[in-house]
Image (cartoon, rainbow, N blue to C red):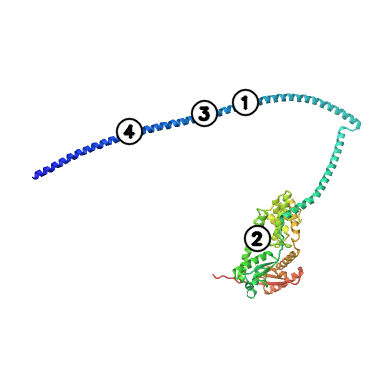
Amino acid sequence: MQFIYIFAILFSAVLFFLVGWYFRKRIGQSKVSNAEKLAEKIVKDAEREAETLKKEKILEAKDEWLKRQHNFENEIKKRRNELQREEKLLASRELNMDRKVDLLNKKERELRNLEKTVKDKEKILGKKETDLDRLIAEQNEKLEKIAGISNEEAKRILMDNLITKAKQEAAQQMKDIKDKARMNAKKEAREIIIQAIQRTAADHSVETTVSVVNLPNDEMKGRIIGREGRNIRAFETATGIEVIVDDTPEAVILSGFDPYRREVAKLALEKLIVDGRIHPARIEELVDKSKQEMNEKVVEEGEKALLDCGVHDVHPELVKLLGKLKYRTSYGQNVLQHAIEVSFLAGLMAAELRLDPVLAKRAGLLHDIGKAIDKYTEGTHTSIGVELARKYGEGEVVQNAIESHHEDVPMISPISVLVQAADAISGSRPGARRETLEGYVKRLQKLEELAESFNGVTKTYAIQAGREVRVMVEHEKIDDAMADQLAGDIANKIQSEMEYPGQIKVTVIREYRAVNYAK
């Protein structure tokens, strides 16, 4: 039984294997057949697509060929037309050239005929000139016999008569020209000057000797005065400017004849008011700082004047001196404003006269430059000015204009004449200058100079409109007894050398300071 069971199982397995193998073979044959059909279909489709693509490419190639053939034919046609136009143009030019050649040949024949005619006429003229010379010689011989003088003598007499007559006519013409020039010169000069004045039309600056400083409140006046007046005394000593504290609400007045000192004092006082720490040490510190700021401000004013006048390439030292002129007055007229006005006037008149207006402006602007330091240097402002111009590289024309504008030396250029005229115009306008203020300022300057002439004096300040002069001395050279004697000597010298109304108080200040530093 067991054997039969195993045999049945083996038989079944063999049977199933055979059946599976048969079906697998049939399925494989079916797949191969289907794959062959699919491959045949793909090949046929590929052949059809290749044929279609081939036909399309052939058609595209034919279109491209036709297009290029068409373009080629158009280009050939265009070139053919251009060649035809060129041929026509060449034919026309050849025709014109033939005509010109014919015309030139005709002109050449005419010139030959004309040349022949000219030669014939030259022969005739030569013969006539020979006959004329012969006739003139015969006539001259007859005239010499009749007049009893030779040909050369007659020529000399005739030339003398002609020269004399020409001189008379020339002298008369010169006289007429001079008379006419004199008649027109004044009129034209007036017109040029009037036009220059109208075009500048500068305002006249009325210079004063006081400056007003506004205060935030009236309480500040007491702080400015300080305990027992120590602050106000320290401020006046440091600046040389009198501080007037009166009933004017929220303001104090700074009085002094020197505008530069007054401006320094104004700057320092404004700084003190803003700072609020008002005491002698702080006053001296801010006064020194204000002096430094004034030096910078002076340079700015000089550069502004140069820019306004259109003058360039000026030495920095001259720029600084030019700015200082803003704080100088001449007979009540601001010197910097006067210099700018002279520059404009000279430049305008130079332009009218066809001269160099830039050079005229430069000379006009610098003509009073010596006034910036003439208080501290011996000599007139013209001599000081020309030395400064020479030192800092200004040209000969500018130097001469500075030196000759008061006729101290001869003028070498028309520019110098224009500067002198412009200076006179600017200074002589009604209201431009006031003699009284200038005399007052000169009196105060002389008062300070007299006090400074003594040994041991460091600084002097004229205050209270010249009614007091304060003298600072070196404590090493002047003791208390000598200070009293010095005050008397200064007072005596003032009495003997100056004229003044009322009386002048001389105050000699001797101060000793011991300074050390804690480290």
**Mark 3 or 2, closer to the camera:** 3
Q: Which residue is mark 2?
A: 298
The amino acid type, in three-letter code, at marker 1 is Glu
123 or 140, nearer to the observer: 123
Mark linked to residue 406: none
Which corner quadrant of the image does residue 272 belong to? bottom right
Q: CA distance from mark 1 to mark 4?
A: 74 Å
Q: Position of residue 234 (x, y in %)?
A: 64, 71
Q: Which residue is mark 4?
A: 44
Q: CA distance from mark 1 to mark 3?
A: 26 Å
27 or 451, nearer to the observer: 27
Q: Residues within 10 Å of mark 4 (few under 14, many from 20)?
A: few
Task: State which tag comes first along the sequence, 1 or 4.
Answer: 4
The amino acid type, in three-letter code, at marker 3 is Ile
166 or 337, nearer to the observer: 337
| Element marked by disc 4 | helix
Task: State which tag comes first along the sequence, 2 or 4.
Answer: 4
Q: Position of residue 66 (x, y in %)?
A: 46, 30
Q: Quadrant of the C terminus?
A: bottom right
Mark linked to residue 94: 1
Which corner quadrant of the image does residue 321 belong to? bottom right
Q: Position of residue 353 (x, y in %)?
A: 74, 49
Q: Which residue is mark 3?
A: 76
Q: Residues within 10 Å of mark 1 (few under 14, many from 20)?
A: few
Q: CA distance from mark 4 to mark 3?
A: 47 Å
Asked whether the viewer can see residue 511, the reply is no
Q: CA distance from mark 2 to mark 4?
A: 107 Å
The amino acid type, in three-letter code, at marker 4 is Lys
Asked whether the viewer can see residue 145, the reply is yes
Task: State which tag comes first along the sequence, 1 or 3.
Answer: 3
Q: CA distance from mark 3 to mark 2?
A: 86 Å
